[in-house]
Amino acid sequence: MKLLVTGGSSQPGFKAIVEALKRGHSVTALYFKNAIPLEHENLRKVRIDITKSVMLQDLIFKERPDVVLHIAAYGDVDGCERNKQLAWKVNVKATMVLALAAEVVKAHVVYLSTDYVFDGEKGLYSEEDLPNPVNYYGLTKLMGEVAVMSRCSRWSIVRTSSIYGLGPGRKNFAKFLIERLSKGETVKALIDQFVSPTHANLLAKALLEIAEGNRAGIFHVAGERMNREEFALRVAEELGFDKSLIKKAKMEEFNWFARRPKDSSLNTSKTAERLRTEFSSTERALSELKREYLSLM
């Protein structure tokens, strides 16, 4: 199978590339600012600004992939609120162009979305729950979903939550935790915000299963519901750090520019019945994190 992966230097993008190559697929990986630290005979890396519509369209026409894993996004929540024009160009307009081009070449589009399409008022959102984003990042990702569903005849929407892991990509909460705790420094962890922390390796396996099976529809691929403090304590215990360094905090203490949902956790039961990949197990996810951590020591 021939895949085109956007956001190849992001954590989920990089992990998806690695998983695809393991499975013997041919991959064209797109990146912009940060290079992809991987070489493979079945990997072609292309530096491109996906907001350049003609360039993105021409590339898809030339490559003619079987599947497009659309992972690239402007994911800075506060940044999206401050620079709405850029957020729209990256998260919505580029997705519209990609979706139209993918339809022309009859490619299946797998679009990586987010729990932030929900308002966080109830938590454990199912695939059937009505999105209602409370910030501009969530709105643009929801509009990306709409663009894919309305322009493609072959599509999958994969919503996930709080992606973490070690390796390439921007700093996530697990990276931040490990960096601080390994130095004996304290970490503030929220007790009143609930998410579904998702390990990037397990997400990548699920994405590839969906891509290989041309599975259509909306999927919730995420870990178990917990607050930030519980996640931090679980990570500290798994990696042998001092749990007393983790201090309770509340959302009101953080000077965020954009509003955050209080409980954007995802109900994954329906998706778990459709996929073989065991993506929701915290035990398995933390063992993956520990393996990554030990490999870097």
Image: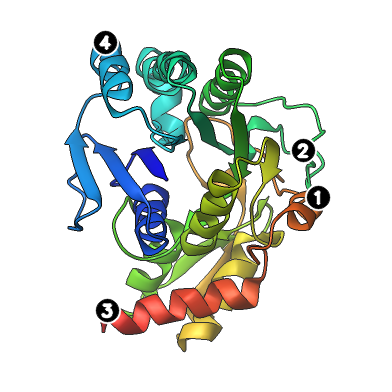
Tell which of 228 and 248 is nearer to you: 228
For this view, does 237 lie left or right of residue 221? left
> At x 45% / y 23%, what residue is drawn?
81
> At x 21% / y 50%, what residue is drawn?
36
Between the residue at mark 3 and the residue at mark 4, the CA separation in whole angstroms equals 40 Å
Check contact, mark 3 vs mark 4: CB within 8 A.
no
Check contact, mark 3 vs mark 1: CB within 8 A.
no
Kind of residue indicated by mark 2: Glu
For this view, does 253 lie left or right of residue 1? right
> At x 30% / y 12%, what residue is drawn?
53
User: Along the polypeptide, which appears first: circle 3 or circle 1?
Assistant: 1
For this view, does 18 lie left or right of residue 255? left
Point out the frontmost of discs 3 and 1.
1
Between the residue at mark 3 and the residue at mark 2, the CA separation in whole angstroms equals 37 Å
Kind of residue indicated by mark 4: Val
Residue 33 visible, this orientation: no
- Quarter of the image containing the N terminus? top left
Q: Quadrant of residue 49?
A: top left
Q: Secondary structure at mark 1?
A: helix
- Say few, some or many: other residues with alpha carbon within 10 Å of mark 4 (under 14 / 14 to 19 / 20 or more): few
- Say few, some or many: other residues with alpha carbon within 10 Å of mark 2 (under 14 / 14 to 19 / 20 or more): many
The label number, if any, that marks residue 54 in the structure image: 4
